[in-house]
Amino acid sequence: MNDNILILDFGGQYSQLIARRVREANVYSVIYPYDTNIADIKDLDPDGIIFSGGPNSVTINGAPMINKEIFNLGIPILGICYGMQLMAKLMGGKVQKAKYGEYGKAKINIFKEDDLFLNIDNYSQVWMSHGDQVLELPEGFNITAETEMTSMAAISNPEKNFYGVQFHPEVVHTVQGKNIIRNFIYKICQVQASWNMADYINNKVKDIKNKVNGQKIICGLSGGVDSAVASTLVYKAVGKQLTCIFVDHGLLRKGEAEQVKRTFGEEFNIPLVYVDARERFLDKLSGVKDPEKKRKIIGREFIRVFEEEAAKLEDAKYLVQGTIYSDVVESGNDTTSTIKSHHNVGGLPEDMNFSLIEPLRNLFKDEVRRIGEVLGLPEDIVWRQPFPGPGLAIRVIGKIDREKLEILRDADAIIQEEIKEAGIYKEIWQSFAVLPDLKSVGVMGDVRTYGYPLILRAVTSDDAMTADWARLPYSLLETISNRIVNEVKSINRVVYDITSKPPGTIEWE
């Protein structure tokens, strides 16, 4: 295969983000595990290879390694963070634990320009996250950049087309990181910009057709952009073989169930089964406070409902889910830690009776939206803000009951209305309300109140891997607060969460 970049994953949480940056440059990319057989790499015939970062240290026994034969393939290689350290060590250099780790923003001093730093501004901002450092270079390598704390922030061997950066060019905090990756792709690997979302759709349609081979499929439809795009993509591949099942678990936002039934059952004319499981889910969640238990209960119940409904459909063998990569990476795997389990990843029971089809599993939200646009989905579906599969269960902190859910629904509806009215809905990644498990004293009409505070959360992001709190206008915050306190029963104050991710997550649970 020509015009493609291989990312070898050493367990870094940004590995898929590297692939995304490559695809943004209209070049096909694929992620393989770090221990992929050299023969398989040769079969792929990549134009370039990127070693990802990772949570381990190359100085310890058992650290993820790679066959050194990879350096004899004549393929350009870019090592990022752990990937740079690994390259240096395997090629004869020396790596050791740094006296002081370097984490966060830094300024990079480029004192030896090469193709990787072509047209990159000196002293531009980069994002560091490492505890080890390269102490001695392998033969044939040069130092090309430094930061205040790291003397070898970038290294290169232009003769062999091997490059390493100690920082993370794939994250938005590295201001010119996209251009650094593009330099590697275009200048060093010399590939052509020949891949796009239309190609992705066509390839997925072919894959799905071949996989299901005429058998029936069910789709867990939530009405969010992920499941909407996934179901539409599968419908494009198999038509009436697909039946969408919409489970109303009682944890949806105001008017959401009616909207889903209207949009998919009536407007799109996709076969749709509506299941009212509100009592069932709330009974299972009764008294449960731990967020991980909530997520896993919801995941298991979803599958059980699907199995029961599938039994009514003859020969349904496959389950479509709108899983995207941020769900997968936050749920953890063999090399990454679990941040939080997602109901459509970590909560699936081992004895599930379906084979999964997850056509969006390797994509980020903005890529999913672009596919939705190519497929012709309405703008209000494509640009709907992300909504978690467990729904309001993880926005009611602690135990869940019907009263708390109604409070949260009413408050959330006001937030959505006012942000849309302000004309900034598309600019915000997510905006929502959180109901904490505590009460505070207030005063309304000269009378003491003892009600819930409501937490308003709004963030901006490109990919959900990192996020910053949205700088909403004071006038908008005032309007939202006034409306919620006056219109929503049991709320007597509104507070605004100004925590970024990291260190926080977007959702509270």
Image: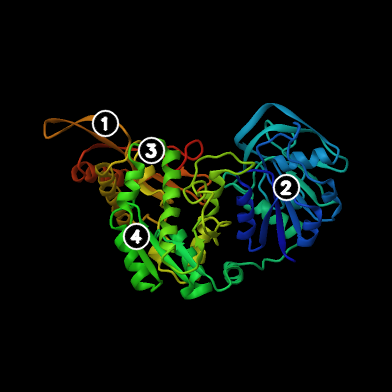
Q: Nearer the viewer, residue 377 or 275?
A: 275
Q: Estimate the spatial distance between the alpha carbons at disc 3 and disc 2, rounded to whole Å.
A: 38 Å
Q: Residues within 10 Å of mark 3 (few under 14, many from 20)?
A: few
Residue at label 2? 34
Q: Nearer the viewer, residue 197 or 125?
A: 197
* Horizontal relation, residue 349 to residue 2: left or right: left
Q: Mark 3 belongs to which amino acid?
A: Asp
Q: Which mark is residue 62?
A: none
Earlier in the chain: of badge 1 and badge 2, it is 2
Q: Mark 1 belongs to which amino acid?
A: Lys
* Horizontal relation, residue 376 to residue 183: left or right: left
399 is higher (above) or lower (below) than 185: above
Q: Position of residue 200 (x, y in %)?
A: 59, 67
Secondary structure under badge 4?
strand
Q: Mark 4 belongs to which amino acid?
A: Val
Earlier in the chain: of badge 4 and badge 1, it is 4
Residue at label 1? 439
Earlier in the chain: of badge 3 and badge 1, it is 1
Secondary structure under badge 2?
loop
Q: Residues within 10 Å of mark 2 (few under 14, many from 20)?
A: some
Q: Estimate the spatial distance between the alpha carbons at disc 3 and disc 1, rounded to whole Å.
A: 17 Å
Q: Position of residue 281 (x, y in %)?
A: 35, 48
